[in-house]
């Protein structure tokens, strides 16, 4: 399983970014892919997850209505469209994938040991 995140950057409050997670080494329809973020001093949290088997999604309450997770199977990529960004959205965003999880379960209960380099999102004036 290989995942590469991209798309982070500096944006003003109210702005938008789209993160991309390009995956290889597995078939999405058997996996769940999620976006997690790490803020210094806080535990990593699951922001949004999508089940490849049924397309179900999960969003943490703080991003509902602002973030949208989607997939393009032809490009082996999962996106996180982030609109109306807030300073509290600042952090390093990681994508992860695993087998056998629901979208909610993967975001809330998983405890992965290995993470990629992530992509930094900074929301600031």
Image (tube, rainbow, N blue to C red):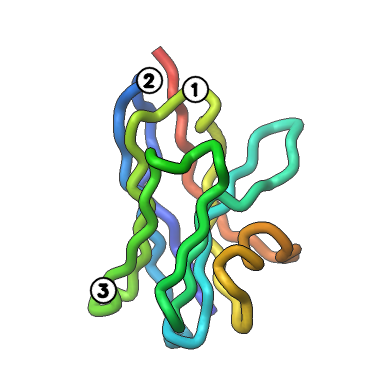
- Report the residue marked by disc 3: 75
Mark 2 and mark 3 residues within 8 Å of each other at the beta carbon: no
Question: Pointer 3: residues within 10 angstroms few (<14), some, or many (20+)?
Answer: few
Which is closer to the viewer, label 1 or label 3?
A: 1
Give the image quarter of residue 108: bottom right
Place of residue 123 in the rendered image (x, y in percent of width and height, measured from the top left):
44, 25
Place of residue 41 in the rendered image (x, y in percent of width and height, measured from the top left):
75, 31
Mark 1 and mark 2 residues within 8 Å of each other at the beta carbon: yes
Alpha carbon of mark 2 to alpha carbon of mark 3: how far? Answer: 30 Å
Which disc is residue 87 wearing? 1
Which is closer to the viewer, label 2 or label 3?
A: 2
Residue at horizontal 50 percent and vertical 68 percent from the top: 33
Residue at horizontal 33 percent and vertical 47 percent from the top: 81
Sequence-wise, which precedes: disc 1 or disc 3?
Answer: 3
Q: Is residue 58 left or right of residue 10?
A: right
Mark 1 and mark 3 residues within 8 Å of each other at the beta carbon: no
């Amino acid at each position: 399983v290989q995942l590469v995140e991209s798309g982070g950057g500096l944006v003003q409050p109210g702005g938008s970014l789209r993160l991309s997670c390009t995956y290889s080494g597995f078939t999405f329809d058997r996996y769940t892919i999620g976006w997690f973020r790490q803020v210094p001093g806080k535990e990593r949290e699951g922001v949004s997850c999508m089940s490849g088997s049924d397309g179900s999604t999960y969003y943490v309450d703080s991003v509902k209505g602002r973030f949208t997770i989607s997939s393009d199977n032809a490009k082996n990529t999962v996106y996180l469209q982030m609109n109306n960004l807030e300073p509290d959205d600042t952090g390093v965003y990681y994508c992860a994938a695993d087998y056998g999880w629901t979208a909610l379960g993967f975001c809330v209960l998983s405890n992965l040991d290995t993470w990629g380099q992530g992509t930094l999102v900074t929301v600031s004036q």
